[in-house]
Image: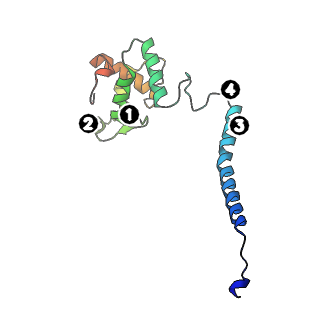
Amino acid sequence: MPAAAQHRRPRRNRVLRTLVVAGTGAAVLALPLIGATTASAAGSTTTTASTTLAGYPNNLDGWIRESLAIMREKSIPGTYNGIYRNLMRESSGNPRAINLWDSNAAKGIPSKGLLQVIDPTFKAYHVDGTSFDIYDPVANITAACNYAAARYGSIDNVNGAY
């Protein structure tokens, strides 16, 4: 077919197609957000995984704040910064952390949780009102801070493995 007889689409069609494709993409991206907004409103009367039973955010900040509230009730000293500094060094903020290579692990009692507590220490320094699960973030933090208070005066005084 000669070049003069080739059919060319007008430029406006290409622009229109681009707008339609972009609009469709935006709608696809917006749908999950719209659905999430309406779905969350329906479940507002129940406890969700985003908060603890005590109403704190179910994240590192919330676990520390909930632990501090319990510690205040039980007169266990410690600050947010002291807890945060130690648990970032010990577990990088992973509540399921477990140390399988140090001397405790070699004895069969590995350090576990946010503040890397061994089972006998967790049991001895467990704080009433918290879970008996060593991996529970609030129970782990609170027991570790109770231990650190008895041994060092406060978790704030711990600057290395303890």
Give the residue type at disc 2. Answer: Ser
Q: Residue furthest bottom?
A: 1
Q: For the residues labelled 3 and 1, say whether their Cβ atoms are less than 8 Å apart.
A: no
Which residue is found at the position 66% from the left and 40% from the top? 36
The image position of residue 58, as x and y in percent, is 52, 30
- Which residue is label 4 attached to? 45
Q: For the residues labelled 4 and 2, say whether their Cβ atoms are less than 8 Å apart.
A: no
Is residue 26 something one can see in this rendering? Answer: yes
Give the residue type at disc 3. Answer: Thr
Q: Is residue 8 left or right of residue 127?
A: right
**Mark toward the viewer: 3 or 4:** 3
Can you say which quadrant of the picture contains the N terminus? bottom right
Q: Residues within 10 Å of mark 4 (few under 14, many from 20)?
A: few
Q: Residues within 10 Å of mark 1 (few under 14, many from 20)?
A: many
Give the residue type at disc 1. Answer: Lys
Tell me: residue 88, above or below residue 3.
above
Which residue is found at the position 69% from the left and 57% from the top? 19
State the separation of the CA atoms marked 3 and 4. 14 Å
Give the residue type at disc 4. Answer: Thr
Which residue is found at the position 27% from the left and 38% from the top? 102
Tell me: residue 30, above or below residue 74.
below
**Mark toward the viewer: 3 or 1:** 3
The disc, 3 or 4, on the residue closer to the chain's N-terminal end is 3
**Residue 112: image tag:** 1
- Which residue is label 3 attached to? 38
- Which residue is label 2 attached to? 103
The disc, 2 or 3, on the residue closer to the chain's N-terminal end is 3
The disc, 3 or 1, on the residue closer to the chain's N-terminal end is 3
Number of labels in the image equals 4
The image position of residue 126, as x and y in percent, is 41, 21
